[in-house]
Image (cartoon, rainbow, N blue to C red):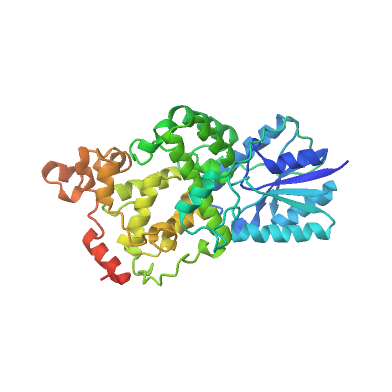
Amino acid sequence: MNVSVVLFTADLRLHDHPPLRAALEGARQVVPLFVRDRGVTDAGFAAPNRLAFLADCLHDLDAGLRERGGRLVLRSGDVVEEVCKVAAETDADEVHLAADVSAYAHQRERRLRSALEADGRRLHVHDTVTTAIAPGELTPTASDHFAVFTPYFRHWNGLRLREPLAPPRTVHVPEGVGSEELPSRAAIADVSPGLAAGGEREGRARLASWLRSGLAAYEDRHDDLAGDATSRLSPHLHFGTLSPVELVHRARRAGGAGAEAFVRQLAWRDFHRQVLAARPAAARADYRTKHDRWRSEEAARADVEAWREGRTGYPVVDAAMRQLRHEGWMHNRGRLLTASFLAKTLYVDWRVGARHFLALLVDGDLANNQLNWQWVAGTGTDTRPNRILNPVAQARRYDPDGGYVRRWVPELRGVEGGAVHEPWKLAGLERAVAGDYPDPVVALSDGLARFRQGRGLD
């Protein structure tokens, strides 16, 4: 009786799952396998918020498989060793895996293919599982990837996507395959108190609600900090509890300007993944060589700590950093503002900020996180690398009444209206109310002067 193994990684769902569909079509029995990969843990990517969300996802995936007569098999250790062990235990002919873009994922695929072939087994790697368009499917004439988003999106938007696949009706797992106990969110320490729940059911419910009541207004409201009008689907895309192919199809069916703006954001995600697939070193090295004279982390220690704690004296920056700590998530406009403040106003190496984000973000995706940080820092794909986001001007534009700031910075809840964005200008009773709130760590004019000098713009 032939058997196939499906190695789940960042694709923790049953809807629209090409590796699972292929395995079920090619074998009478299938082992749905997840490996708690020692390589990921050793590399420092096992942040508490993502481990907690992952625990939710694994429980939900297991429940979905059990409803179909199957179950999830969980192992821990070196991913290649564990997959080969399961394949040997079940005499599996094939292993199916979703393609991914990081250097680690490429190495994992090479090692796994070599080990399986040595045992007379085959590895099948499937595209468009974690992306809508596979990295490398679109390339400009003179390069192996697009370095600018606009031409990439023009080509991306013209491609026909495959149709989403229905979830399986039944999954038959070989008897006797050993599995570890699934992890529990409750057993994980240092999880953000406001962390959202994970799992495919949760993701699909959130998607249905978003399509019904949020998508239409997305173009007009996606930068509204107080309105919190984004989809909040990024954790589900990161863990693959939702399919990007399905999201694009369903948004396009809904139609309208909001859907177009949302699809564009999904294309940004694919854009960053095709950049990282072509340039894996961009996860840690400048994508463009700038030779920036960053302030060292040691020299900027007090400023960096104030930034991490949300005590910079710039309320919109502090609000976003406190949201990150409480929820393990941050509004996209907040991500841009806080990154610009660290990399350009404080002139600290973008890698310092990227590490902090990865330590807390539940959607801490290597491609999106690192390349968005590089975009803001001016070392990445931004065609205007010297742009600086003024936190006061941005706050007035995207949080005009100060609702976002008052939500996350309780010291300033007694300050009414837009005055909350410049507490150093307050007088009298309002200044006394905000007395526990710090003064700015740096004047914006001084930060701009330091940035211009460091970039050689003067």
Position in image of residue 138 (x %, y %): 57, 53
Q: Is residue 229 left or right of residue 69?
A: left
Q: Quadrant of residue 290?
A: bottom left
Nearest the eye: 441 or 226: 226
Q: Residue at x 11, y 44 (%)?
A: 428
Q: Nearer the viewer, residue 47 or 204?
A: 204
Residue 189 seen in the current view: no
Quadrant in the picture for residue 308: bottom left
Residue 327 appears in the figure? yes
| Residue at the extreme front | 141
Instruction: Specify whether 2 is left or right of 300.
Output: right
Which residue occupies the foreground of this view, 237 or 260?
260
Q: Residue at x 56, y 32 (%)?
A: 204
- Percent from the top left, x then y, of residue 292? 38, 70
Q: Quadrant of the N terminus?
A: top right
Q: Residue at x 28, y 51 (%)?
A: 391
Question: Viewed as shown, does residue 2 lie left or right of 221?
Answer: right
Where residue 33 sits in the image (x, y, percent)?
72, 45
For the image, the number of numbered tags is: 0
> In percent of the image, x 64 and y 37: which residue is there?
16
On the image, the x and y values in percent for residue 273 come to 54, 53
Q: Residue furthest right?
A: 1
Q: Residue furthest top?
A: 212
Classify the position of the C terminus by image quarter. bottom left
In which quadrant of the rendered view does residue 244 lie?
top right
Q: Is residue 225 positioned above or below 286 on the image? A: above
Which residue is at the front of the view, 143 or 49?
143
